[in-house]
Image (cartoon, rainbow, N blue to C red):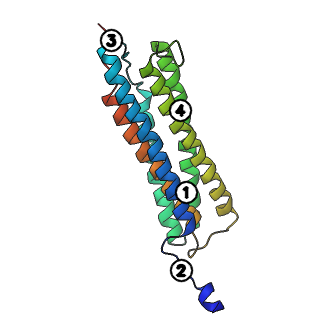
Amino acid sequence: MAVEANEKKYIIHPAKFNLWLFIVSIILLFGALTSAYIVSKGIESDKDMWHYFSMPKVLWLNTGILLVASVMLQIGLWGARKGDFRRAKIGFSLTMLLGLIFLAGQVVAWFNLTEEGVVFGAGGSNSGNYLYVITCLHGLHIVAGLIFMGYVYVRLMGNRYHPGNIVGIENAATFWHFLGLLWLYLFIFLLLNQGNPLV
């Protein structure tokens, strides 16, 4: 009986299940935000209240940076699955560096928007407010992803993983890849819904 309990196998590891629940909650959050964006745009466009903004060019660069970061992390994950934890350490360190550069790029984008007159708050338009809220919330999730990867990286440096136990590495990679896909969705969504120039 004890042996049977020790050899218990999960259909899905509890840590992975919890991560996917968290991911679903994030999908619902951003789904609600983008839906509200479309509704507001429809209502305010009819009243000529929806302000036009152009996406800062740095966001194109940021998108490329996030894609490269995912590639680096995936290479590290493949290494970990083969027992090559040196490659995993390199992949994680490069991904975290690129993640920090991405966040810096977002700050640059916000400065560019304010220079264009797109500001957040009561003095700004709803289109600008949504833009800041959506990109800021995504940025906060990137920060969470970096903290998660930092924790895993410390454990990697302490040789806490082995080929039969890399759930933490896999979860960090899954979460980061999800954030990359989420950003692609948000970036394309915002590109297609910048609004119409006021005449």
- Neighbor class of circle 4 (other Cα within 10 Å; few <14, some 14-19, many 20+) is some
C-alpha distance separating marks 4 and 3: 26 Å
- Neighbor class of circle 3 (other Cα within 10 Å; few <14, some 14-19, many 20+) is few
Q: Give the residue pinned by disc 4.
A: 136
Q: Secondary structure at mark 4?
A: helix
Which amino acid type corresponds to the residue marked 4 in the rendered image?
Answer: Cys
Specify which label sits upstream in the sequence, 3 or 1.
3
Specify which label sits upstream in the sequence, 4 or 1.
4
Quarter holding the C terminus is: top left
Q: Which mark is residue 9?
A: 2
Q: Closer to the camera: disc 1 or disc 2?
A: 2
Q: Give the residue pinned by disc 3.
A: 48
- Please state the horizontal and vertical placement of residue 7, each as a whole percent of the image: 58, 85
Q: Secondary structure at mark 1?
A: helix
Which amino acid type corresponds to the residue marked 1 in the rendered image?
Answer: Ala
C-alpha distance separating marks 2 and 4: 40 Å
Vertical side of 65 occupied by 80: above or below: below
Vertical side of 23 occupied by 60: above or below: above
Which amino acid type corresponds to the residue marked 3 in the rendered image?
Answer: Asp
Q: Closer to the camera: disc 2 or disc 4?
A: 2
Specify which label sits upstream in the sequence, 2 or 3.
2
C-alpha distance separating marks 1 and 2: 22 Å
- Neighbor class of circle 1 (other Cα within 10 Å; few <14, some 14-19, many 20+) is many
Q: Which mark is residue 27?
A: none
Q: Closer to the camera: disc 3 or disc 1?
A: 3
Specify which label sits upstream in the sequence, 1 or 2.
2
Which amino acid type corresponds to the residue marked 2 in the rendered image?
Answer: Lys
Specify which label sits upstream in the sequence, 2 or 4.
2
Asked if disc 1 and disc 2 are in contact, CB closer than 8 Å, the reply is no
